[in-house]
Image (cartoon, grey):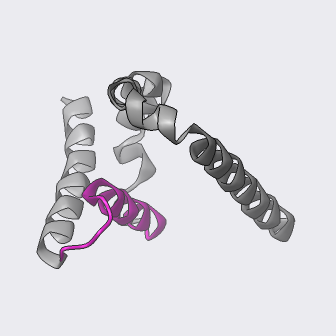
Amino acid sequence: MKLLSQLGIILFFFFIGEFIVFILKLKIPGSIVGMLLLLISLQLKIIKVESIKEVSTFFINNMLILFIPLGVGLAAQWDLISKEWLTIIVSIFISTFIVLSVVALIINKKK
């Protein structure tokens, strides 16, 4: 029963995020808004980490399974990907460099 209540908390924030995106007609996924709300709730200690720890650990440990739909989607769009492969590769390298640089700057500022 504990796992169901933990999952319920995460799903609650997911659906709240979806609802906010639907009402405000935002251009970002509702799941992202929901997880940001969950993050804010955790930071403000509205929800304790222990309230979602076991289910969160399960999701993190089994994250690879969540990438299966992505792989299927990529395979389904192979014609488009094969035409734009150079653009995709360049954007991957540029975005990876930007992310690594930002993370390095953040880590250096914390020290």
Toward the viewer: 69 or 33?
69
Q: How many marks are shown on the rendered structure?
A: 0
Is 22 displayed left or right of 42 in the figure? Answer: left
Q: Quadrant of residue 58?
A: top left
The structure residue drawn at horizontal position 43% and vertical position 61%, both measured from the top left corner, is 39
Q: Is residue 53 above or below residue 46?
A: above
Magenta region, main secondary structure: helix
Residue 24 at x, y percent in the picture: 18, 78
The structure residue drawn at horizontal position 42% and vertical position 68%, both measured from the top left corner, is 40
The structure residue drawn at horizontal position 24% and vertical position 53%, both measured from the top left corner, is 14
Q: Is residue 77 above or below residue 37?
A: above
- Does the magenta-highlighted stretch encompass residue 34? yes
Q: Quadrant of the N terminus?
A: top left
Toward the viewer: 96 or 85?
85
Residue 31 at x, y percent in the picture: 29, 54
Q: Is residue 33 above or below residue 63?
A: below
Residue 74 at x, y percent in the picture: 40, 30
As drawn, the residue found furthest toward the bottom would be: 24
Residue 16 at x, y percent in the picture: 19, 62
- Does the magenta-highlighted stretch encompass residue 91? no
Q: Quadrant of the C terminus?
A: bottom right
Toward the viewer: 22 or 84?
84
The structure residue drawn at horizontal position 41% and vertical position 44%, both measured from the top left corner, is 50
Toward the viewer: 44 or 13?
13
Is 36 displayed left or right of 83 in the figure? Answer: left
Q: Which residues are magenta?
A: 25-44
Is 83 displayed left or right of 34 in the figure? Answer: right
